[in-house]
């Protein structure tokens, strides 16, 4: 894949951030999307605390994989170091979305992972969406956002999960992070996660003894959308 | 009834699919509507994975009752074989809608049918909205979408239900399917089902001992909208 | 008060019906508003099964207090006889709204009245919103819509409630009816009822032992908006 | 800080009131925002019972800190005396918003404070959002709105809370009040409170044994947005 121009990258990341508010996933400035151009190793993220609808491609901050700002006049998102760790450790991902979307955050706050209760979930997440531990007082003092990324990586590795097969995690007491092949794809996974969390809350209320769906249904739904034999969409 | 032109059929199906997103029943591309012209035996469905708002009548895929594509440059919905079985087995239906609408899907995931808790439900669905079993590993391997249709037909026949009197089912672990006299009518039944599911969740929370409404109220409400003596609407 | 022109009456009733859908209280055609001109004894209601947004003043059906259509080319709402009984029995009301709004209907289906849990409720409804019984098989057979009105009147009289002090009831298994000094005012009470029902569901979940608010708070809030010493709004 | 012109003040307060309805926090006329110019000691509030979208800067009522109307042809909000007490007693605040937003009001009605269940809450509210007692019959009779303000001040002082560190309270049986450095900032805190209340309801449903977040996470999130070392936003 040839390197994108910086302008393309900024536009993609700007578009995905501008789509946050209409998606219903964020209020105020509670969310950010980033994207990376793996060919050049440059990545881009929303500036901190800026209103989504006012955002222009020129406002997007471009960084390298050492976390140095390469272009942009604004301070990058306060969550920048979390994104940086994830891009460094997961070379397969091309985009990251962080929101405090309502129902996914309910699960994160409650300390409950989201089991796969149906095919909507299976279509996007290959099994239970995992919970990532909270940081220790030492980690918080030393570098909160960096260690948030470290804890996410640690948890997915511990569970032997590929971040494109399980493109979502919930951090305890905090909120979700989702991944994708690019910025907009990571946002779509945030939309899917929010819907699955909402459905899971209702299904667990209706049937407290509910269990995860049978393995053969999970595999079928996941693989008809993902993997070499996928047959969903226009190829 | 004279055969519709293919253009009419594509427009009707396009309109109903474009109405999915404003109806609040779908996010991303999680839903599809089809419609059939019984005079010609041709039917039409949304292409797979295409954004609703970009959809034009020319994008709609036309098939025959053998499942062969007759017109259209796109791959039809991944759920096409389910619709095909339903059109073949239920000659009275003229439209089918499949969504993962939030509250109806909560019931499907929880493995709970939706009893008739009120007149809103009775106006559209003549009794309990039934649950359709999940497919076996063998059925999933052999032909997932085909057997989804087979299981729906099997369940309605077992309960001796006419698909226009009970124009909705919930597939366990999955989501709802609704039927109608044409594409738009099946979508209206999806809207009604989603509202009834939402109301049922709340009513069951407020009154865990709630039972179905009395038979004479069910009959009255259903028959004032349906059947030979209906007196709702402009005749 | 001089008689309104029929055109004024039709416009008021048309406006209120067109406001139903944007209010979020109705889906499809599940609701209707009527209004009366007490000086002439003529009243007007939505035609049955017509889409709200297509509604024009000329489509509104005008009737007299014997239930005879005076003007209008369409069949009036299927709930017309219910409205008629209410206008005949409650000379103080000037408008009626019937919807199947989500949370109010949850309470109606669950057979639970809505106690006054807070000042939002007290501002609009002077105490517990009562439940009206379901009709008997005989009443349903003989004249369903007429006896719905009769049961509402019977219940408010039994509780010695003035329909402008308690401008809402919930019919068991069915849905709410609200009253007002005119068509739009009855719609505003439907909006207030839906919000109060939603709040009540949440409050009762958070505190199952919740009771009605203290009497002195109820009186204060109700009387600052209603009655001779009201001081809310621009006089 | 130089005194604002009255026109500036009216515009700021008008803008914040007009933002109430699009924010989803109010229905009908259930909410009001005010703002103060500390240099001149003049403050401004919404007129009572006026529709938000019709509001123009010239309609905003300007008062002094004795509660006398200085400019404006309308009667000020019925909650004016509550705002007055708060501005007199809390010199650090520059804006106040009062709504009956859905989920915050559920907690107020249920008599439950909102513990800090997550970082969304910590970002805006430094600990548990407190409950303010209901007024006594004597206070209601004597001066309802005045004593509402008195009870809020009493409660924050009792808990030794700074109203900019804890810019929200819930009055028992009633609804929330939020504070900010100006009118729009107080509205943003109402939006944050409503979201946190909604999340808290869901989290407590998912995990009835849920406790407040660890102290070190609360401090970190609050201080990265507030206080001398804040590093969120564009400085």
Image (cartoon, coloured by chain):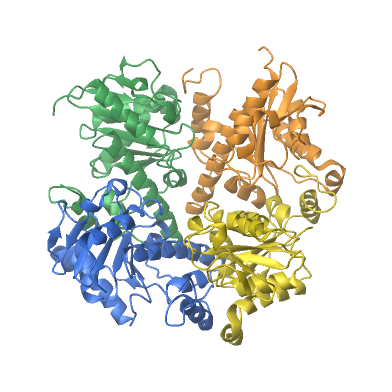
Chain colours: A yellow, B orange, C green, D blue
In the figure, residue B38 lies in which quadrant? top right
Q: Nearer the viewer, residue D26 or A8?
A: A8
Viewport quadrant of the N terminus of chain D: bottom left
Residue at 69% over, 28% down: B58
Q: Position of residue C99 (x, y in %)?
A: 41, 37
Residue B129 visible here = no
**Would residue C53 be found to the left or right of residue A98 on screen?**
left
Res. C102 visible in picture: yes
Write the residue at 31% across / 77% down.
D156
Tell me how many marks there are: 0
Left or right of B96? Residue C215 is left
Residue found at the far top of this picture: B2
Vertical position of residue C78 compared to residue C211: above or below? above
Give residue B87's position: percent from left, percent from top: 73, 27
**Is A226 left or right of C14, judged from the image as shown?**
right
* On-image quarter of the C terminus of chain D: bottom left
For the residue pair B69 and C46, the one nearer the viewer reads as: B69
- Which sits in the foreground, B51 or C136? B51
The residue at 21%/73% (across/down) is D39
Q: Is residue A89 above or below residue A1?
A: below
Task: Say left or right for C151 vs B127.
Answer: left
Among the 4 quarters of the image, the one containing residue B76: top right
Q: Does B110 sit above or below residue D98?
A: above
x, y percent for residue C100: 44, 39
Q: Position of residue C106 (x, y in %)?
A: 46, 46
């Amino acid at each position: 894949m040839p390197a994108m121009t910086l302008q393309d990258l900024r536009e993609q990341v700007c578009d995905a951030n501008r789509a946050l508010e209409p998606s219903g996933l964020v209020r105020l400035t509670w969310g950010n999307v980033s994207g990376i151009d793996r060919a050049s190793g440059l990545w881009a993220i929303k500036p901190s605390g800026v209103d989504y609808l006012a955002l222009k491609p020129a406002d997007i901050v471009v960084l390298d994989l050492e976390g140095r700002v390469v272009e942009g006049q604004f301070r990058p998102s306060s969550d920048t170091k979390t994104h940086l760790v994830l891009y460094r450790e997961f070379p397969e991902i091309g985009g990251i979305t962080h929101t405090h979307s309502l129902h996914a955050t309910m699960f994160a706050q409650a300390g409950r992972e989201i089991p796969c209760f149906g095919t909507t979930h299976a279509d996007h997440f290959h099994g239970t969406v995992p919970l990532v531990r909270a940081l220790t007082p030492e980690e918080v003092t030393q570098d909160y956002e960096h260690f948030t990324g470290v804890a996410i990586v640690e948890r997915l590795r511990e569970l032997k999960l590929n971040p494109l097969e399980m493109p979502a995690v919930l951090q305890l007491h905090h909120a979700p992070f989702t991944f994708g092949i690019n910025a907009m794809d990571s946002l779509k996974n945030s939309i899917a996660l929010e819907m699955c969390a909402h459905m899971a809350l209702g299904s667990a209320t209706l049937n407290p003894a509910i269990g995860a769906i049978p393995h053969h249904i999970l595999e079928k739904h996941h693989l008809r959308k993902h993997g070499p034999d996928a047959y969903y969409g226009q190829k």
